[in-house]
Image (tube, coloured by chain):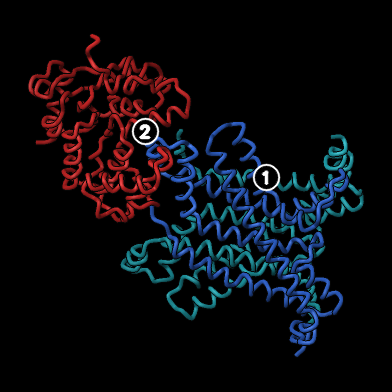
Amino acid sequence: MDFFNAFLNPEIIARYLPALIRAVWVTLWISVLVVISGLALGALLAGLRAYQKRWLSWPIVLFADLMRALPPLVLMLVLFFGLPSVGIILADWFVLYLILTLVLAAFVEEIFWATMTSLPRGQWEAGAATGLSFLQVLLHVIFPQSLRMNIPPLVNRSLTISKMTAYGSVIGVKEIVSVAGSAQAFSGSATPLTMAALAYLIIFYPAMLLSRYIENRFHYEH
Amino acid sequence: MDTIIDAFFNIDIMRQATPLLLKGAWVTLQLCAVVILLGLFGGLGLALLASSGSAALRLPAFVFIDIFRAIPPLILLILIYAGLPFVGVRVPPFVAVCIAFLLNNSAYFAEIFRSGIKAIPKGQMEAARATGLSPAQAQTWVILPQAIRNVLPDLLSNVVEIVKLTSIASVVSLSELLYSANMARAVTYNSSPLVMAAGLYLLLLWPLVRVISRFQRGLSISH
Amino acid sequence: MTAAQPLPTLEITALEKRFGETQVLRSIDLNVRNGELVFVIGPSGSGKSTMLRCCNRLEEPTSGAIHVSGKPMLGIPRKELDRMRLQVGMVFQGFFLYPHLTALKNVTLAQRKALKRPRAEAEARALEMLDKVGLKHKADAMPSELSGGQQQRVAIARALALDPKVMLFDEPTSALDPELVGSVLKVMRDLREGGMTMIVVSHEMQFAREAADRVVFMDGGVIVEEGPPEEIFGNPKSDRLKAFLSRVSGEAA
């Protein structure tokens, strides 16, 4: 009984449910924004890199390396605490959104780039030989194939990064962990934390099953 | 320009913070060693269960893997660290981190091992059984070594993810690298220690990230 | 050249290609008249594929000139090159159909994006071309559902739909199972009868005998000998060609 009182107290569940539901919305819409802009930016960067101009590739590779090697939490703290001292003040949610978007974009760029370079050279040549411009080959021949081959890793990476919205709690974004944390402090009960974990399960467990389904479904043969 | 250098790349402050950050980096390294090993063994065990012929073993393994891939490790860590005292169990930060990471990393490693095992042709198992190996022996000596070799790049990627993930231990006041840097920031009112911590993470992870990119390289683009 | 002679459809002049230290093509001159089928033979590594790929600049020539109907292929801006490539159809050994598009879409893509044809016109033209290669009924099939021979015929239709002035065939049947070769050769024969200008790099000697107007023998990056098929096969002059022919017929026997 002790256990239930501490982790699943009905009274506390009822009291904090509305606040938590609001927090779920915050988590959800930041996640959706991050996934949309991260995928778009990553695809754009991979496309630019395909032009193989040194002055263009070099910064893209550097960006992708940094964003994949640095912990997102460190990046967020640097921006959140550092920028105000040079006169730039960003909203906490925007810092979270920005960093997660950049991190996702870096991974997406690498995912696309890896398949773009492993497609048979003849795919590029067939496009060029029929008079398509480089951009047209990229858009109509290479990119659709890369996308189809990459649906499983893109979905997985998007889910992983979406869960990182939890880091928002460290800089005060009113998302699930942050709201559950303060509710725990106020109520003196671990129940809000359990609720937070359950909220994530409700959101992401189906997503995990979906990603399994996609992995089996989109086993793409060349 | 000067204000940027002063705010992010202040040499004096970095010098002051160096001993603290090095101590933090050392804790991070120890933490990584422990949680990576725990995760590898936990993941391997789970993967074997998830690849077994019996649904009674397979199903719980899958549920475990999916649950702990669905819950962000941060909330898992807070739940263990701040929640367990409510039922009279007090765990030190290091242990809380280890438990949370064991649950989370095992699930991720298991998924990698499992996909590796799944990709090995059935004929390998049949050939091994035909030479008189038991299913367990065939799994251990024939299937696993091939599977592990095939998923080495993914294992390495996951190791990088885990090293980065250890930064969340700062949330439960474990004095690892990010925690130390953030302390130094709070004391000096200057972000340079955070930048320095970023530098140390880079030192450790950049080479690995390069290696991972190498693994994936093909070369076909032509103009 | 006298004034009365019409411009060659394809004109290769003093073409050189070097990969680093190795000289792959040295001073190649070759003119292909309108409606002519030129067959290029030679041992592997003789530079014949490289020559073909230089004609639409999939390979960048080191020096020399290439003209299609009198217009230069080299030293022109990128945009102009894309337009010139429309005049030069190419068929690859490996087919290279786009695996994510149906046969029909494979044939319409460049028509719509490069030639800017309206969809209805592009599709009508694509169906006409697929019919020509005997695959109208496979218009909605994905490449993975087609045999190698069928894929290669779709690839030919893809090139033809752009109304090229000349068609380049780079070992079009080498990747095919023997029983599928005939269907592709038949399409090529039909094309020739329709008056298409063609350069064919291939090992199908029998086809060369029957269909070629002229056979060019390349070895070591130069054109060693050229002439009508009966001359090249019946009365080879150079030792290198004799050695090559005896080796090839030895393999066939």
Q: Pick the residue in front: C94 or A40.
A: A40
When the figure is inspected, residue A158 is found, relative to residue C122, above or below; the finding is below
* Quadrant location of the N terminus of chain A in the rendered image: bottom right
Residue at horizontal 33%, vertical 31%?
A: C88
Q: Is mark 2 on a helix, strand or loop?
A: loop
- Give the Cα separation between the discs numbered 1 and 2: 43 Å
- The residue labelled by disc 1 is A66
Q: Which of the two residues, C176 or A23, is positioned nearer the viewer here?
A: A23
* B42 lies left or right of B48: right
Q: In this view, does C231 lie above or below B66?
A: above
Extreme-bottom residue of the structure: A1
Quarter of the figure with residue C171: top left
Amino acid at dot 2: Leu
Horizontal relation, residue B115 to residue B12: left or right: left
Foreground residue among B24 and A31: A31
Q: Which chain carries label 1?
A: A
Name the residue beneath numbered marker 2: C86
User: Would residue A10 be found to the left or right of residue A41 on screen?
Assistant: right
Check the rendered structure and report the hue given to chain A: blue
Q: Which residue is drawn at 62% across and 64% down?
A: B105
Across and down, in percent, residue B191 comes to: 85, 47
Q: Same chain for marks 1 and 2?
A: no
Above or below — where is C33 with respect to A85? above
Q: Circle 1 — which element?
A: helix
Q: In this structure image, what is the colour of chain B?
A: cyan
Q: Which of C183 and B138 is in front in this view?
A: C183
Residue positioned 80% across, 77% down in the render: B85
Please identify the quarter of the rendering in which residue C6 is found. top left
